[in-house]
Image: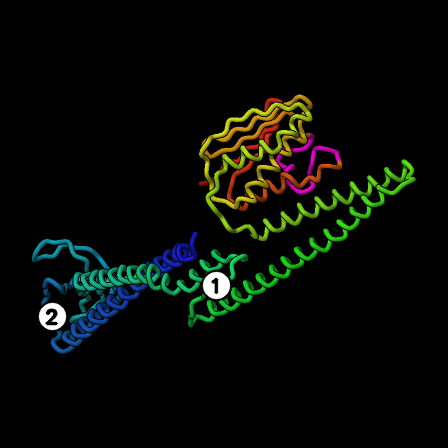
Amino acid sequence: MKLIAKYNRVNIPITIATLLISSIGFYFIIRYVLIHQLDKDLRIEKEEIIHYVKEKGTLPETSNYKDQQIEFYPATNDDFKTKFLTENGLGRQDGETRSYRKLEFSVTVNGNNYKAVVKKSLQETEDIIQMILVIVFSVIVLLLLVLFVANRFLLAKLWKPFNHTLEQLKQFNLSSKNIITLRDTDINEFKELNETALFMTQKVRSDYESLKKFTENASHEIQTPLAIIKNKMELLAQSENLEESQINLIQSINHAASRLSRMNQSLLLLTKIENRQFENKERIHFSYILNRLIDNLEELPATKNIRVIKNIANDFFIEMNEPLAEILISNLLINALKHNYQNGKIEIDLSGNTLTLKNTGPAPKIKTSELFERFKKESTSNESLGLGLSIVKMICDSYGFDVSYNFKEEMHVIKIIFSH
């Protein structure tokens, strides 16, 4: 979920709730103020009636207007309390139901007690309140509309520098010499983000270059003494008067040096793939490369009398680095040959966008998915480094190919689904 959407999900409901609660409170405040003003008018009418009684010594005439009514009723209790009431009643002129605010109080005329009732219509007050509510809700709708537009467009514009920085970081490539370009912004947080992003990418590139040089130098420095050791062992093996135990020792040392050399080359290859040093792509004829490498290795199956069954599409092309494609195919073929039975078989199928390679062999003792890890291997032979399938997995991951390894029907099955 995007940050703006998350912000809107929190901000808009809170804003709506705040406006609604404020509107309800505003309604009661306005109603209280208007009724208080109406009560004040009723008190003025009361003072006028009392003043009239004192001056004239008689009750004023009753009135029955649309908005105001004055009535008098005989009362027996001279201790009558003044009180305000709200009631509904029929208007005497139009017969419509109206709400009234009334004031009841006692008045004494010539020793006789009367209950005076002064009513004023609440219709005008209610009309004012309704008009205020309409205005308030109109303002709420307008505010929500403005808030939506602001969140949709203004906030999106404010976040443009962040989105641009994020896009540049997504496109950042260690193997490329291009430096990420970030937009200028007057927002302090985005400025700090851009500065941090530039610093980190430069540091990562610097560390990558250092690691790349170290790997290349280390590989070269290791290969040189290994080559010297092998040459010296070969010269030593040609010496005269060597005992059998000495010959066996020389062969063991030479074998260990060869194995260490192969391991060094494999680890260097893995590092180069991880560091994306095989970035150059081209449209290669994968079917031709596959057939060619199978033919180059045809002598190896013959040593174990392994039958190779091929079903390879003629015109399968793919975008990838050709040396990596050759390494991928070679490791798959060598793995199928190395971990096979005497008189076993290998089935190779390339159709659609899928390469499937099956071979007979003993059932794996560990999970097949673990065999893609480095130095994980089924064979106990010193010839196996446990890096062949790791290289296959690394190449597939770098190109987004889906690779899987299963053991079905007494067959090891490696399947690669290429993405076009």
The foreground one among 85 and 140 is 140
> Residue 257's image quarter?
top right
User: Which residue shows up at 18% across the image and 73% down it?
Assistant: 50
Residue 222 visible (yes or no): yes
The foreground one among 278 and 98 is 278
For badge 1, the amino acid type reads Ile
- Verify whether residue 265 appears in magenta: no
x, y percentage for residue 126? 20, 61
Is the stretch drawn in magenta largely helix, strand or loop?
loop
Residue to which mark 1 is pinned: 180
Q: Answer above or below: position of 184 versus 392.
A: below
User: Which residue shows up at 42% across the image and 64% down it?
Assistant: 161
Q: Which residues are magenta?
A: 365-381
> Residue 347's image quarter?
top right
- Verify whether residue 378 appears in magenta: yes
Label 2: which secondary element: loop
Residue 81 visible (yes or no): no
User: Does label 2 or label 1 sit earlier along the sequence?
Assistant: 2
For badge 2, the amino acid type reads Pro
User: Which residue shows up at 22% across the image and 65% down it?
Assistant: 103
Residue to which mark 2 is pinned: 60
x, y percentage for residue 395? 56, 44
Q: State how far apart marks 2 and 1 are (Cα).
A: 93 Å
Q: Is residue 185 left or right of residue 301?
A: left
Label 1: which secondary element: loop
